[in-house]
Image (tube, helix red, strand yellow):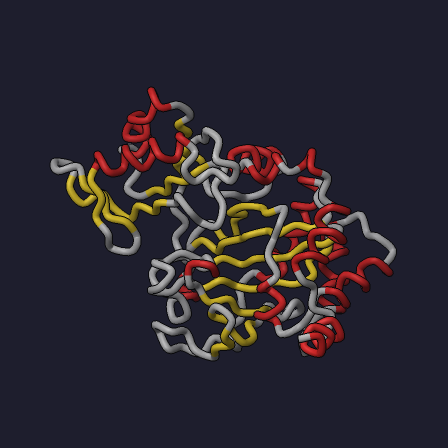
Amino acid sequence: MRSWVQALRARGVIGMNERNAEYIQRYNPRRLYPLVDDKLRTKRLAMEAGIAVPELYGVVESQHEAASWLAIAEQHADFVIKPAHGTGGDGIMVVAARTSRRQGLFQLVDGTVVSEAGMCHHVSNIISGQYSFVGSRDSAMIEYRVESHPCFDEIAFQGVPDVRVLVYKGYPVMSMVRLPTRQSRGKANLHQGAVGAGIDMASGRTLSGVLGNDIVSEHPDTEAPIAGFTIPSWAHFLSLAARCYELTGLGYLGVDIVLDRTKGPLILELNARPGLNIQLANKVGLKSRFDRVDAWTQQSDAEEKVAIVREAFSHC
């Protein structure tokens, strides 16, 4: 066991304890957590800063208003309902279509059909805090449903892939794209069975994939190769991620970005405690990249940081 741990450390792989003590506690003041733990607050901050996010249709904040989601939803052919304080993708319901207004049925993106009463129950559960990070009362957000860019058609199943960019002191140091699968029910969440693929920071080209703790070369459902795909608008992805450091002040930050069919890159959410599977997806440890950032003269401009990163952290 000791030799295995030493081998990982020699490759610069960071573990949970080191992440918590050396990076989260040191660079993420607890007073700033509400800026990212509350998705509604994050969205409003981003909008004020001119950072593109999915449009907010409405918010339901109390049980006596729980049924008001329907009036909001009826104005849109499709939409997403999510908890403002949710975590790990839990509680998110993606509605693709209203199948029958007479019968009050809604079709989810995975093909499941839910009744109007079932939707009301879900909104009520969100408000009661069932999906909240701390278990306290929550709010239900109704927002624009991102439409996956067609470039992902062959390497994603049903849902919308997202790109996780890990930002350290304002520098985007590592990234991966999370690809929905049948197992994840169309959600881009690794813990629910999505595939994570590392991304070359310079080119935006995908590397090998990881499913759970296994390295994979093909998508389990489409059988398309995972490596060698180039993320469109890659420089814009990195620029958006770098700007989120200015938005929050958090020195260790996970930024989740989606590529919409018509609207381009949109910030989906921010995370003050991003996980470490990104190292497995990229087959490289974070420590050496963090150390290099620590040694650099800090740049104040997000675009300058992106340019430095793209030159320094290429897999090529």
Q: Is residue 265 above or below residue 4?
A: above
- Residue depicted at x 56% and y 60%: 233
Q: Position of residue 292 (x, y in %)?
A: 81, 64
- Work out whether residue 272 or residue 307 is closer to the camera in this orientation and state it: 272
Q: Is residue 16 above or below residue 130?
A: below
Q: Is residue 74 above or below residue 313?
A: above
- Work out whether residue 176 or residue 305 is closer to the camera in this orientation and state it: 176
- Residue depicted at x 44% and y 63%: 194
- Residue depicted at x 41% and y 37%: 130
Residue 65 can be seen, yes or no: yes
Give the image quarter of residue 219. bottom left
- Work out whether residue 137 or residue 310 is closer to the camera in this orientation and state it: 137
Q: Is residue 51 above or below residue 276?
A: above
Q: Residue furthest left?
A: 102
Total labels: the figure holds 0
Q: Residue furthest top?
A: 64
Q: Quadrant of the N terminus?
A: bottom right
Q: Position of residue 52 (x, y in %)?
A: 54, 44
Residue 57 can be seen, yes or no: no
For residue 305, side relative to residue 273 (left or right): right
Q: Position of residue 89 (x, y in %)?
A: 44, 49
Q: Position of residue 239 (x, y in %)?
A: 65, 53
Give the image quarter of residue 30. top right
Q: Quadrant of the C terminus?
A: bottom right
- Residue depicted at x 59% and y 62%: 234
